Image: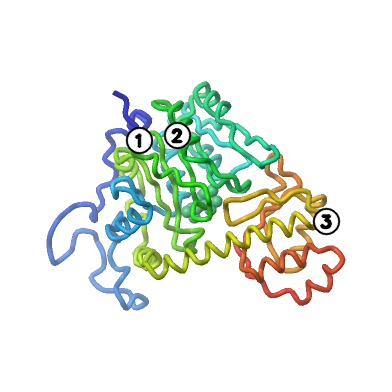
Amino acid sequence: MSTVLDLVRPDLRGFAGYGSARSERLQGSVWLNANESAWGNPADPGDGCRRYPEPQPPELIRALAQLYDCAPERLLVGRGSDEAIDLLVRALCVPGRDAVLATPPVFGMYAVCARLQAAPLIEVPLCEDGAGFDIDPDAIAAAALEGGARIVFLCSPSNPTGGAISPERVAALARRLAGRALLVVDEAYGEYSEVPSAIGLLEAFPNVAVLRTLSKAHALAGARIGVLLADPALVAVLRRCQAPYPVPAPCAPLALEGLAPAALEATAGRVAVVRRERRRMAAALAALPGVRRAYPSQGNFLLVRFEDADAAFRALLDAGVVVRDQRAAPGLADALRITIGSPDQNDAVLAALRPQRAAATAEIAPAVETRA
Ligand SMILES: *Cc1c(COP(=O)(O)O)cnc(C)c1O
């Protein structure tokens, strides 16, 4: 019987990884096994950083398992979902042989990690129609099987195009790729989506993995907490391939607090605001002269095509509003991606793009934070 381990590089299936001091289960009261200092740093009066942290902080793992409603052994926590993407590509793809499939225009890290691993990149572009951008499952399955893809990355909701993929469609594709490729659903913007998560597929489909993060809706991008949800056997392999201490000591308690009931409630409130503002901004942008199209979005951003994207980008910059220029992406030569901000920040976007009154409103536009 084939298991998901058949998708792991043969030379890594039995790999033990680095045996860090922290991973040995020993008991004692005087810890002299990791060459840590016996004294704290003056900058660290709480002594929180003197010792190496837990590789997978158990309390954080429990909280995340509860948040995503899955078993703790299905969960790998690391430095953002970016690390999980990199780990997956390194652990599954034999350089020069096993390919990575991505669906441009899409988040760039899939291609970057493929390149770093010397894994061939197969690109199956999204299709565009009246409803927006969407995947082409037949083309993806055919290209993956023919091209020897080990990993197929789907982004749902997709950055930057905003569309989401239903679990039914993910399941259908997973079935076609069974035994041949891991289907990774990147749900970095899942909290903002009205389409259900693919997490519910994990038990039935060992070749499905889901990426989640605390960086976007949970507002903890700087803490670098990302999560891979996958088959426990795959998670066990990836833990052995991961850097020894991926979660810095101050980040684990911060993330835990960020997942406490009151914080989750605040997060849910902000997600509701973003959804409301997303609707308002999509309608307002579409009504502006010079806007060709504002795509429907399940994320906290809108992809917008302009008659003159350069002028729009500049008008926004002149008003102090920095948006993401998408013009180098395939098929998006006239497009900008605008994150949904606070209502005031969104008003600043609209004011800057209103042609006649652009000069006047720029002066009174509220200060807008810069964001990555
Ligand atoms: C922002 C983003 C990520 C990166 O998330 P981190 O957890 O901060 O590394 C992953 N995937 C997509 C699609 C993103 O837009």
* Drawn side of residue 182 relative to residue 17, left or right: right
Q: Confirm or deny contact between disc 2 and disc 1 (CB under 8 A).
A: yes
Which amino acid type is shown beneath numbered disc 1? Ala
Residue named by callout 3:
289
Q: Image point 47% across, 65% down: which residue? A: 267
Q: Earlier in the sequence, mark 1 or mark 3?
A: 1
Q: Position of residue 248 (x, y in %)?
A: 37, 61
Q: Is residue 179 above or below residue 214?
A: above
- Residue 67, numbered circle: none
Residue toward you, 356 or 171: 171
Residue named by callout 2:
171
- Residue 204, numbered circle: 1
Q: Image point 13% across, 66% down: which residue? A: 29
* Drawn side of residue 112 relative to residue 254, left or right: right
Q: Is residue 164 above or below residue 121?
A: below
Which amino acid type is shown beneath numbered disc 2? Ala
Which amino acid type is shown beneath numbered disc 3? Pro
- In this figure, which colouring scheme has been used for the structure? rainbow
* Drawn side of residue 356 relative to residue 248, left or right: right
Is label 3 in a helix, a strand or a loop?
Answer: loop
Report crowding for label 3: few under 14, some 14 to 19, many 20 or more residues within 10 A (C-alpha). few
Q: Position of residue 111 (x, y in %)?
A: 55, 39
Is label 2 in a helix, a strand or a loop?
Answer: helix
In the image, the residue with mark 2 has its CB under 8 Å from the nearest atom of ligand 1: no
Residue 259 in which image quadrant: bottom left
Q: Earlier in the sequence, mark 2 or mark 3?
A: 2
Is label 1 in a helix, a strand or a loop?
Answer: loop
Q: Confirm or deny contact between disc 1 and disc 3 (CB under 8 A).
A: no
